[in-house]
Amino acid sequence: MPYDQYETVIGLEVHVQLSSKSKAFCGDSTVFGSDPNTQVSPISLGHPGTLPFVNEEQIMYAVKLGTALGCEINTHSSFDRKNYFYADLPKGYQITQDRSPICIGGNLQVKLGDNYKSFRIHHIHMEEDAGKSIHETGSPYSLIDLNRAGVPLLEIVTEPDMRSAEEVDAFMTGMRRLVRWLGVSDGNMEQGSMRCDVNVSVRLKGATEYGTRCEIKNVNSMRYAKRAIAYEVKRQIDLLEQGIAIEQQTLNFDPDSGQTTPIRDKEDAHDYRYFPEPDLPPVKLTNEYIRAVKDQMGKLPWELYQDFTEHLDLSDYDASLLTEDVRVAKYFLGLQHLSQQTKSAANLIINKIIPYCKDQNLEIFDFPVSSENLVKFIDLIRTGKVSSAIAYQRIFPALIENPDIEPLSLAEKMNLIQSSDHSFLEDLIEEVMASNPDKVKAYKNGKKGLLGFFMGELMKKSKGKADPKLANKLIRDKLEGK
Ligand code: ADP
Ligand code: MG
């Protein structure tokens, strides 16, 4: 198969809409989902005589993301105009950074199966979003919504370091976690807060030069990205195998047909007529400012992951889950600190609290039971008052219903305190033995595996309250006639 002889090469241009409440160069709101054309003003509509101004928040987010990615922060960057004519671009140009972007270099390390791979960042620049064109099928005209025009963006341009759709997926997932962690963006791909242009080329394995690339525009779901890449890779290899050179093109992916098709040629770089934006001053940053942003940033997800696995001895699985989201990580650290029970705190959060909050659509910090009561709940298990199975299955749901009641009182009220009362357990064991004489005989004849059966029966009879360690010993003693 010729396909096996080729290697896929991919580089991304990731657009991230910032969490900033106002647009990049004016005060219009950026809230998603409002009625069309209600978040516009003379500046975002590009009326003559209006002047843009710089949004400090956009700069702060750029410095934050750049610092997290290990970029060099440019203390002197500037804006440029990228000119093109399109209905969703009211000014007739986009304000972007072409000659001197705010962040240079850097990389994002991502987990791929059991390994890590580092993807280099070429640069990050600040720009503004365009409006949205709505083409309804069968309609003789298009609709334009300019609410999005001027929404602040960061564009992260990677080096062509990815070699498969899986790597693209892993990179985007890692980037989404990071922008959410930092509060830079909600990273919501369905709402278009994070989208990417996917540059794809192929080359024979072992070749040193890259092949000619095609750029698939505006991919807003990883599922589409995978399909688009698969289609594009096959298309390019088929052409090369026929001896036809790849033409550098800008493409659209149509999810319905599963195909990529060339789009209008506005993207041709030489047509943009970039020139310095005359209405905005350059962005000058002091080293003190850059350091202050860094100091406020707190630990990054991979730093906490390392802490959790190396210093707290958590498994890779637990540490990954607990560093998915900054609030979950903080919540865990709080409970861990308060309870001094690392593994129990992790288990409780992963197995009970996260699923409950997901189900109820709650933020983890809005979980109804206080950390103090959760610590008492953990202690109930630790001190052997309740078995962990009973605690998780019976007491925890009751605690959610009665978050202010002490877990111990709850367990007492529910009559679930584990019994380590010898005579109580011995009576029950005798009952179990009396109703199963054949099993007792079999055990005495050497079928030691029946111990589990007797334990099970005892647990049923005691309604789960038997302290398993003690029960185990007592059953054995009784069966062996000690
Ligand atoms: P331009 O300056 O023409 O816009 P760049 O060289 O800056 O292009 O690259 C833009 C994007 O395309 C980057 O994400 C880069 O990684 C990617 N890219 C560049 N060359 C290739 C290639 N041969 N195959 C795949 N992706 C590429
Ligand atoms: Mg761009």
Image (cartoon, rainbow, N blue to C red):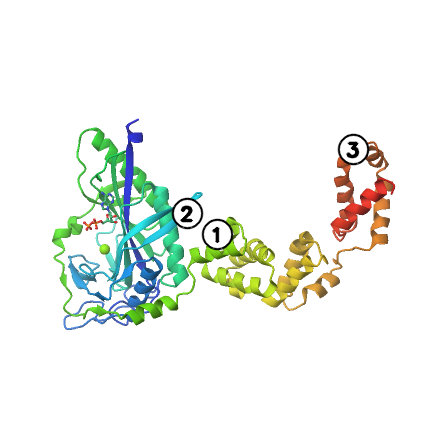
Q: Amino acid at mark 2?
A: Lys
Q: Do the numbered discs 1 and 3 sit on residues whose CB atoms are within 8 Å? A: no
Q: What mark, if any, has residue 320 been given in the picture?
A: 1
Q: Secondary structure at mark 3?
A: loop
Q: CA distance from mark 1 to mark 3?
A: 44 Å
Q: What mark, if any, has residue 111 been given in the picture?
A: 2
Q: In which quadrant of the rendered image does the C terminus lie?
A: top right
Q: Earlier in the sequence, mark 2 or mark 3?
A: 2
Q: Earlier in the sequence, mark 1 or mark 3?
A: 1
Counting the numbered discs, the total is 3
**Closer-to-camera residue (337/197):** 337
Residue 323 in view of the camera: no
User: What residue sits right under mark 3 in the picture?
Assistant: 447
Q: Secondary structure at mark 1?
A: helix
> Left or right: where does residue 187 sit relative to residue 420?
left
Q: Amino acid at mark 3?
A: Lys
> Left or right: where does residue 56 sit relative to residue 371?
left
Q: Do the numbered discs 1 and 2 sit on residues whose CB atoms are within 8 Å? A: yes
Q: Position of residue 84 (x, y in %)?
A: 15, 57
Q: Position of residue 315 (x, y in %)?
A: 53, 50
Residue at 19% x, 69% y is 282
Q: In which quadrant of the rendered image does the N terminus lie?
A: top left
When the figure is inspected, residue 243 is found, relative to residue 61, above or below; the finding is: above
> Left or right: where does residue 329 sit relative to residue 198?
right
